[in-house]
Amino acid sequence: MSEKKTLGIYVHIPFCKQKCRYCDFLSFPIANEETKEAYVDALIRNIQEQAAVCADRYIVDTIYIGGGTPSLLSFEQLQRICYAIGTSFQIDPDYEWTLEVNPNSAGDSVKLMMLRKAGINRLSIGAQSTCENHLQNLGRIHSVQDIFLTYEAACKAEFTNINVDLMYGIPGQTVEDFAKSLEDILYIAPQHLSAYQLIIEEGTPFYDLYHSGQLKLPSEEAVAQMEEILFSWTQLAEMHRYEISNFAKPGYESRHNLRYWRMQDYLAVGLGASGFFFGDPGIRSENTRNLKEYLEHPTAGTITQVPIHNEMEEFCFLGLRMLEEGIDCEHFRNMFGRRIETVYPPALFERFIQQGLMEKKNAPREAYVLTPRGAEVSNQIMAEFIQ
C-alpha cells in the first residue's frame, strides 16, 4: 500500500452578527439558533461524505475553521464539528488546527480551554485596528478592549500559537493611527501577524461609498509609510515576512495557508467552500452557495478540471507570494515533470533580476524569489506568469 499523502481541510462557517462594510466573503448575519444547528448537522454530513471518498488515501495535518465568524457557534456545536473530523479522518499527531475568532464572540478562557481540549491548537483573532473610530468605520462590532481581553483569555487557555489580523489603508486612517495599532499588537507579542491593505471589493457598502466619492482613503504616500513601519517594526519584533501579508516568529508560519500557496491538496466543507486536488488535470470543487440547497444536499456544487498549464501559472504566482521560498524550481520539476525554464523563457526571469525585482537563490533550494522592491509591485510581476 502506498504511503498516504497529507491533506488540509477548510471548514466554512458563514454566520456573523453583522456584515462588515468591507467584506465580500460568503457570510451573512443570523440570529436563528435553529438554522445554525441545521447547518452544523449538514456540515457533519458533508465531512462524513467527503471522508468516505478520500479518507483512506490521506492523513490530515492542517485544519482551518473560518468564516464568517466561527466563534458565534456554541462550544457544543464546535465540539461536534471537531469530533466529526477527528473520527472521519486520520489526523497527523503533529497537526495544526486553526479557529478564527471575533473578539466579542470568542468567549472566556473556560470556553477557549474547552476548545483547546477538543483539538484546536491555533487561534486567529480578527482585530483589524486598535482605534475605536476605525473599528466603527469598518463595521466591526467589537471594541478595542475586547481584543485584549480575548488575547488574554486565549493565553489563559494555554494557546501558544495565536495570529492577529490587522488592516491598513482604511478610511480616515493616518500613519500615526496605524503605528499605534501595530505597536499595541506587537506589545502583546502574538506568534503570527497578518496585515492586509484594505481592498475595495465590488458588492460591499465601501464599494458604493468609494464610487460615490464619500469614502476618504489614505493617500498612496501614507500607505507606503504604513508599510515601511510594518516591515521595520515586525523585523525588530523578530517576526519574519514569509509571505506578502504575513509575518511570523520562527516556527509559527501558518501551515494551512502555506498549503494553499504550495498548491498542496486541500478539502473544503461548508457553504460555498472551495477545495483543490493537484493532478493532470487538477480538480477544483466548489460547494453550493445557496443555504437552503446546502442544508438539504451538503455535497451539491460544481467540480471543475484545471488544465496543467493553469496549474503551472497558479504555482508560479502563488509561489511568488512566499517571499522566502519563492518559485521552488525543484518542486516545479517534481510536480510537472518539466524544468520551469522550458515553460517560461529564461529572459523573463533575467529581466526581473536585472531590474532588481527578483533574485535567484541556489540554497537551500534553487528558487526565484521577489526582492523587497519586487514585493511592492508583485501584482504586475505575477500577471506576467499568466500565459
Image (spheres, rainbow, N blue to C red):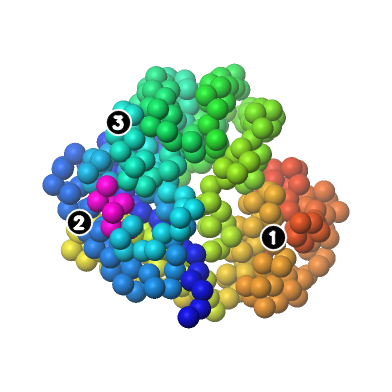
Badge 2 amino acid:
Asp
Q: Quadrant of residue 364?
A: bottom right
First of labels 1, 3 by sequence position: 3
Residue drawn at the location 27% of the way across and 39% of the way down: 72
Residue at disc 1, secondary structure:
strand
Q: Which residue does the numbered mark 2 point to in the structure image?
A: 41
Q: Which residue does the numbered mark 3 point to in the structure image?
A: 110
Q: Position of residue 356 (x, y in %)?
A: 82, 48
Residue at disc 3, secondary structure:
helix
Foreground label between 3 and 2: 3
Badge 1 amino acid:
Ile
Residue closest to the far right: 354
Which quadrant of the figure contains the C terminus? bottom right
Alpha-carbon span between mark 2 and mark 1: 41 Å
- Magenta range: 79-85
Foreground label between 2 and 1: 2
Alpha-carbon span between mark 3 and mark 2: 25 Å
Alpha-carbon span between mark 1 and mark 3: 43 Å
Q: Is residue 275 left or right of residue 47?
A: right
From this viewpoint, is residue 369 visible? yes
Q: Quadrant of residue 127?
A: top left
Q: Main secondary structure of the magenta part?
A: helix
Q: Which residue does the numbered mark 1 point to in the structure image?
A: 327
Residue drawn at the location 81% of the way across and 67% of the way down: 346
Asked whether 22 or 212 is in front, the reply is 22
Q: Is residue 167 above or below residue 348?
A: above
Q: Is residue 224 left or right of residue 308?
A: right
Badge 3 amino acid:
Val
